[in-house]
Amino acid sequence: MTYKVAVVGASGNVGREMLAILDERKFPVSDVVALGSSKSAGGQVSFGDQDLTVQDLAKFDFKGVDIVLSSAGAKVSAEFASEATKSVAAIIDNTSHFRMDPDVPLVVPEVNPQAIADYKKKGIIANPNCSTIQMVVALKPLHDVVKIKRVVVSTYQSVSGAGREGMDELFSQTRGVFMNNPAMPAKFDKQIAFNCIPQIDAFMDDGQTKEEWKMAVETKKILDPKIKVCANCVRVPVFIGHSEMVNVEFEEELTAEDAKKIWARAKGVTLIDLESDMGYITPVEIAGEDAVFVSRVRDDPTVDFGINFWCVSDNLRKGAALNAVQIAEVLVKDYL
């Protein structure tokens, strides 16, 4: 059986990745429709060997569409989703708008694929935040063996997480530094070239940013509501690939060596050992890769049962587009 798929936000970074991954993984499509804003309408995007013309989302009739993959911003999702769900089987939404809705499953296929069964409540499945996805993929196989008590994570997130505008700003500011031109922050609040910015998304009343809050509440919804999460999220001058230094405290003993053995057979995780030729992994090395890469695994001597590890993943693929397509694969296999 084949399906008609619409990609909303098709001309953006994640939308283009969605189209590429649908083709790469041979998703059973009968037709693919590229949708975007009125500004994007008329432009061309690639789907395998085909060039698709972007259509205006505001004027599009979803009748006949089976699945929507959406990554066009929370406001856009809020506006079109309720009407679109009257026609389509399911919307897989990559924005933050539906993630904490109790009637919308928040899914990482390697972690909680069973949650997809609840999609019929609203016809929507939410894709988690990119930094949450890679962390819970790494945590899940450990949590299955010994329950996790607390996680402290510091993220080093690439500018592609802020869209094409973020990537353009890093490029132009980097070039400007060498030309003695002053940095003119626009997408980011401060200069991003040759700098680190300890703010992703807006600040909340308690001093944490919304990105940090998302990592905590999404981990609880996806993995286990009992896990305590303290997140510190930083934007760094890297184009693609989010990195995380993760400290995990368990309820019982689980050593670094135990964790390595678990990750060696875990789905979606690639373990890089210090004793290997690579030693550890960096975001430059994993751009375009699908896995969540774990390295620098070691025991934490400051708590009774704790480990530390370094976690890297392509935020445009596993952190967004790939995860959405994987959800669609489970959806068509088990539920449609």
Image (cartoon, rainbow, N blue to C red):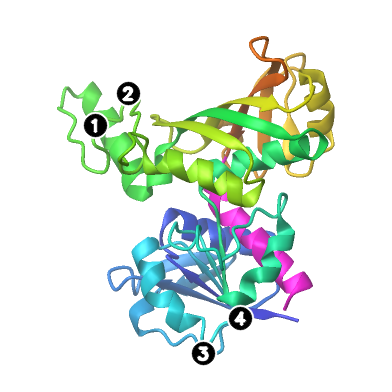
Q: Are marks 2 and 4 in contact (CB under 8 Å)?
A: no
Q: Classify residue 140 as left or right of residue 240.
A: right
Q: Return the disc, 3 or 2, that comes first in the chain's sequence.
A: 3
Q: Are marks 1 and 2 in contact (CB under 8 Å)?
A: yes
Q: Nearer the viewer, mark 2 or mark 4?
A: 4
**Residue 283 at x, y = what percent?**
55, 31
Label 2: state its secondary structure: loop
Q: In which quadrant will I find the C terminus?
A: bottom right
**In the rendered structure, which segment of residues is drawn in magenta?**
314-336
Q: What amino acid is at disc 3? A: Lys
Q: Quadrant of residue 143?
A: top right
Q: Return the disc, 1 or 2, that comes first in the chain's sequence.
A: 1
Q: Return the disc, 2 or 4, that comes first in the chain's sequence.
A: 4
- Mark 3 and mark 4: span between their CA atoms? 10 Å
What numbered label is drawn on residue 89? Answer: 4
Q: Return the disc, 3 or 1, that comes first in the chain's sequence.
A: 3
Q: Are marks 3 and 4 in contact (CB under 8 Å)?
A: no
**Residue 288 at x, y = what percent?**
59, 43
- Mark 3 and mark 1: span between their CA atoms? 44 Å
Q: Nearer the viewer, residue 285 or 265?
A: 265
Q: Return the disc, 3 or 4, that comes first in the chain's sequence.
A: 3
